[in-house]
Image (tube, rainbow, N blue to C red):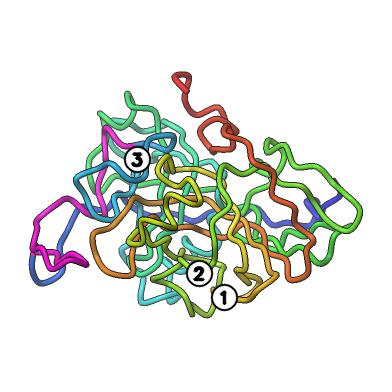
Amino acid sequence: MRTNIEDLVKISVSGEIVHPSYRRSPYRVSADGEVMVVPSTGGITYNVRVGDSALTWAADHVEPGVTVKNPKGGMGTEGPNGGLNVLGCIGNEATVVSGKAEGATGLVTGKHGGSEHLIIDFAPGAMEKMVPGDGILVVGWGVGMKLLDHPGVRVSNMSPQLLEQWKIEEMDGGIRVPVTHRIPGKIMGAGLGWDTVHHGDYDITFFDEGSVEEYGLNDLRLGDLVALMDAGNSYGHIYRQGCISVGIVIHGDSYVAGHGPGVTTLFAAEEGQIEPVLDPTANIASVMGLRSDL
């Protein structure tokens, strides 16, 4: 597949491992009115990685692996944390640059909007040596990528490393993309209306049991590469019939109304240039060889 890879800039971006925190109160109120206290975003999740379920955890928006943010960042894409979130792409290499795990390498697997976190997978042995505040360097590479023979397919948030490993096929007028699920745009929630797809995510809602059953979503995993049907994610997150987008599941489910597992956009097309092909192995942990137990 021809791309403009020779023209893409490799650039350093960095952050620190984020300590878990709560806003104002530890309580979350579920869509059914239940008040609860559970782990949420930030930190090092030793037993939650890409390839694991996105749905079964006693947690809210849990981020798999290691969560990173630049402490000098502002809101959205302001400041250094904006650079980290926009320029760090799914599949980029990350290296620990301070602390007892210095020198360990991992892979970017998600961008979480709202919290403006970058999510990175490291091997369990490396995570056991890390602490919040350790520095992480990411080689940002992928922003500006184009598929030269398929101008109707927009690429965002994706590294050349992931594109090379993913078993994508070219077809007349577009590409065939392996995905684990086809998810209807009508059940996408929090983040809908976000004005850019170049950082962050938006959520799949799981509150309608009929839709979950109809589309076989009960086995959704963190790191799954999924198709969003009738989702026009070329520029922002919108519902538009006929559009198809493809993204990666980057955080876990939520009890809160309108929220659920988050998806960061990787491909988008307005007029049928993407054909999603179901493949149960289409998870970043398998595609990039991050785990030997899958």
Give the number of callouts: 3
Numbered circle sitting on residue 239? 1
Any mark on residue 186, and which?
2
Q: Earlier in the sequence, mark 3 or mark 2?
A: 3
Residue positioned 37% across, 38% down in the render: 53
Residue 154: percent from left, percent from top = 72, 64
* Label 3, label 1: how far apart the Cα atoms are: 31 Å
Residue under numbered circle 3: 65
> Does label 3 or label 1 sit earlier along the sequence?
3
Instruction: Give the dominant element type of the magenta stretch: helix, strand or loop.
Output: loop
- Note whether 272 is above or below 161 in the view shown: below
Where is residue 153? Give x, y as percent.
Answer: 76, 63
Q: Residue 55, relative to residue 112: is it above or below? A: above
Whether tag 2 and tag 1 are in contact, CB under 8 A, the answer is yes
Quadrant of res 48 = top left
- Three-letter code for the amino acid on which mark 2 is drawn: Lys
Q: Answer whether residue 150 is magenta in the image.
A: no
Which amino acid, by three-letter code, is at mark 1?
Tyr
